[in-house]
Image (spheres, rainbow, N blue to C red):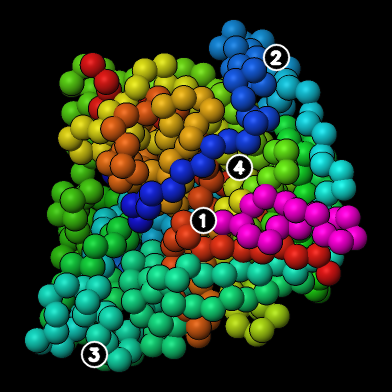
Amino acid sequence: MAGSRHSFRPPRRSDVARVLPAALSVLLGVGTGSCGSNPDQPSPAPTPGVTGRYTLELIPATSCNGHAVTFSVEVTETGTTPYPGVQLLMVSANPALLEVELKYTDDTLEGGIGTTGDGQPSAEGPQTWVNAIASGRTTKTSDGRAEVVSGVLRGYLEIEGVMNACNSASHSFTLRAR
Amino acid sequence: MRSGSRRVRGLAAAGVASLIATTGGSGMEAASPHEVRVRASEAFAPCLSPALDAFARETGVRAALEVRDPDPAAGADVVVGDDSELTRLLEGGVADLATAFDLGYIPWVFVAPEGSPADVKAAAAAADRVAVLPGRIGREARASIGGRVAGDRLRLTRDPAELRRARYALVPRTLAGPGVQRPAGVRPLIAVAAAVADSANAAGARSLLAFLKGARGRAALSSCLATADEVGERDTTGPAALAAGGPAYATAVVDWWMPRCSLETNAYTDPSAVLGAPDAVFLGVKDHYTGMMSLGQGGYVTVDMGVSAVDGPGPDVRVFQTAGNEPVTLYAATGPQGPFTLVGLQVSCGHRTDGGVFSGHCDFDLHDAGLTEARYFKIEDGEIYPCLERGTVTEGADIDAIQILNQKP
């Protein structure tokens, strides 16, 4: 699973000015001292952000020889520390079987999409297993909400009967407002 | 290789040792006439059977082998499975980490008819159907042939007889049938044994584990399980890097993130725990560790190494990961703002570390990213397990340390 050539530049909020105080506080043994805390000021979430119901589409990399599957998800905000974030859960009986945890940095959403070992049925039917990092820039919809029309998905994707397990940095995803 | 004595260290080790001695002295072993129930996945059953027979002959206690996924472990006294199968059981405390140790390795092979292409990926692509294990144990193997075998040409089965009958199969060597066997290029399975924490026969479980760890147990397993040297898993890189002038470890945290859900439920979320040399330790009691950061669902930590790594002989960067085998993704950059380049995606991170280091590790080569040097590294959780479905307080890859193996002069 050697990495394919794939580069990205952190969004502007991750600049040195923002992070060096954290690094210095760690080096000097100061800061809050509590596990998981970040001494930085919380970043404001974009307004309006991703909120409400969406369709999450997972699109396998071309080399994986699969086809896209979709999931209906509900988005909720999850706080602002150390970055503002959102949680996407399935609109189903057991929503936690596919969980998406994303952070905002400016207008970019990034974070993990995960299923358990049991997988999760897609809207099209096939059971799907995904453990991958999604990253995509948001754009505004006509109703003012944000959505991702073209994002990158790096990691593991398997679709029962359709596509074998496939690790790739070239999967993609969309998150469209409904 | 990991052993029980290395999983519990320092004062905690002494405490657990005395606890075992005390309960052992209370006569529990002698008062354990009922059988020991062992649950092991299909790949390990052929190796375990003769060892369990030998145990029964020696002790008079029957060891009943149930062949299935060791997770869930309910009803079993001892579980045996691949490192990746037992990670959640051990981290969640269902299986007792203090009792866990390695039995040996099983390499993966690709079985094909005589005359098939020598290249495994080409042979898989030409096959009408490939039989392979489903679930976590077969995951890396399935991914190794990726898009070359369409989903409808895979036969997912745990049935040993069906796997052995298959003309084409990607299987652990113990499940290979007739046909030409070729090295599959997949991480070998590591057979890990551990006692189930709420076992109804704890004394029997301890007795069996002691037997498997001892000379007669090892002898009974040796014809089936390979050693680290035999499967090329011996750690030579770390000691070589030390001999070449001393290692460089991460000196500062540049950035980090984990979801709120993980922040609220994980117990080890201090990013500074990844700085310096590997020092993570399991304290002998469920969920009690020091010296690591659990990244949670898709979290990451970005570090400054203080000096640069260069693309040199062998791997260039090592990530130490604690408690089981959880995948890690690594990105590298020459500056703190990036651009960060993907070096390795969801790399299995539980290779055993020599030199008395508790954590396992995974190695990365800058060459894979087309980089000649890098000073800043972003270490990202590759497990990406749903936070709300958590079963542990250590969700996500558990990062102990980051080490440069080839340092810029």
Q: Are the residues under badges 2 and 4 in a single subunit? A: no
Disc 1 designates what residue?
Answer: A154
Q: Write down the chain letter for disc 3.
A: B
The answer to whether residue B250 shows anywhere in this view is: no
Identify the residue at the far left of this view: B115
In whole angstroms, how far apart are the C-alphas of marks 2 and 1? 33 Å
- Disc 1, SS: strand
Disc 4 designates what residue?
Answer: B299
Circle on res. B344? none
In whole angstroms, how far apart are the C-alphas of marks 3 and 2? 61 Å
Residue A149 within the segment the image draws in magenta: yes
In whole angstroms, how far apart are the C-alphas of marks 4 and 1? 14 Å
Left or right: A37 as drawn, with respect to B117: right
Q: Where is residue B212 in the image (x, y as percent from the top left)?
A: 30, 56
User: Given this view, does label 1 or label 3 mark the residue nearer the observer?
Assistant: 1
The residue positioned 21% from the left and 44% from the top of the image is: B234
Disc 2 designates what residue?
Answer: A31
Q: Write down the chain letter for disc 4.
A: B
What's the residue type where badge 1 is placed?
A: Arg
What's the residue type where badge 3 is placed?
A: Arg
The residue positioned 70% from the left and 58% from the top of the image is: A148
Q: Where is residue A45 in the image (x, y as percent from the top left)?
A: 82, 39
Disc 3 designates what residue?
Answer: B167
Residue extent of the magenta highlight: A136-152
Label 2: few (<14), some (14–19) or many (≥20) C-alpha neighbours in 10 Å: some
Q: Are the residues under badges 2 and 1 in a single subunit? A: yes
What's the residue type where badge 2 is placed?
A: Gly
